[in-house]
Amino acid sequence: MSLPEDLSQFNSLVDIIARLRAPDGCPWDRKQTHASLRENLLGECYEALEALDEGDSGKLCDELGDLLMQVVLHTQIATEAGEFELGDILTSINTKLIHRHPHIFGSKKVKDAEEVRRNWEVLKQEEREAGTSILASVPKQMPALGYSREIQHRVAQVGFDWEDIDGIIDKLAEEVSEFRQTENKEQRTQEFGDLLFTLVNIARRLGVDLEAALREANRKFCRRFSYMEEVCRQHGLNLSQISFDEQNALWEEAKRDV
């Protein structure tokens, strides 16, 4: 197979993936299945999120390319197995987008983005089979925090939600009190889960992206801890061998300087 003439074309990617999966193609690509690529797909999603968090458009361009490659690779595997083809994917998403945007492709009028969001949820409900829970389609493989936010968001669409943020704050205080009263690991695990669930609810109501907030908190911690390690190296100290009070003093210094 000759090299594609125009590497900026989507069809070039499709042709390259098909060549890699051909009988005389790449041994690694040929042995992949939907199941074996699960971690790769998830990893590429996280790398794209990291690029978004960093605001690095060049890196984001690369990571979206890697993510698109995963989509095309899964599509090629499905095509070979007679499951579905690229055209089926495109038909599905195009049909869905048109159906969920009647204010663009139909005669429905909306006044703002909030009304669009409400209509979107109504249209999604219409697409579900009768008797299906609104929570059934939330992927259970999602990270727990994201899954928690999504199920809370969905039930809020049908009115099952706190009247105001103060009620959730009070609930958080209640959950902290219950956590303090736990007596064994099983109880602590259960009550800690309730604490996290309530924190997710607060983030949802305040419009805080909890995954992004926690990722930033993790990065901040790593920067400060690395600062502590570097200070110790400069002074010929072993971080693990200084006292906790000395470690804490370094941490406070890191908070000021990093």
Image (tube, rainbow, N blue to C red):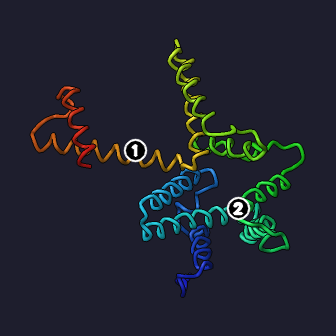
Neighbor class of circle 2 (other Cα within 10 Å; few <14, some 14-19, many 20+) is some
Foreground residue among 99 and 257:
257
**Residue drawn 71% across and 39% down?**
161
* Amino acid found under the numbered disc labelled 1: Asn
Q: Earlier in the sequence, mark 1 or mark 2?
A: 2
Q: How many marks?
A: 2
Residue 178 in picture, x, y percent from top left: 56, 19
Which label belongs to residue 78?
Answer: 2
Report the side of 61 relative to 119 (left or right): left
Residue at left 62%, top 50%?
35
The residue identified by callout 1 is: 218
Q: Quadrant of the N terminus?
A: bottom right
| 45 or 231, nearer to the observer | 231
Q: Which residue sits at x=88%, y=43%?
A: 131
Q: Position of residue 17 (x, y in %)?
A: 59, 70
Residue 234, given in percent of the width and then of the height, sits at: 11, 44
Q: CA distance from mark 1 to mark 2?
A: 38 Å
Of residue 200 and residue 234, the one placed in the foreground of this image is 200
Query: Looking at the image, is mark 1 or mark 2 nearer the viewer?
Result: 1
Q: Please tell me whether mark 1 sits on a helix, a strand or a loop.
A: helix
User: Within the image, what quadrant is residue 4 found in?
Assistant: bottom right
Left or right: 136, with 174 as reference point = right
Q: Secondary structure at mark 2?
A: helix
Residue 183 lies left or right of residue 167; in this view the side is: left
Q: Quadrant of residue 24?
A: bottom right
Check the image and report above or below for 48 versus 38.
Answer: below
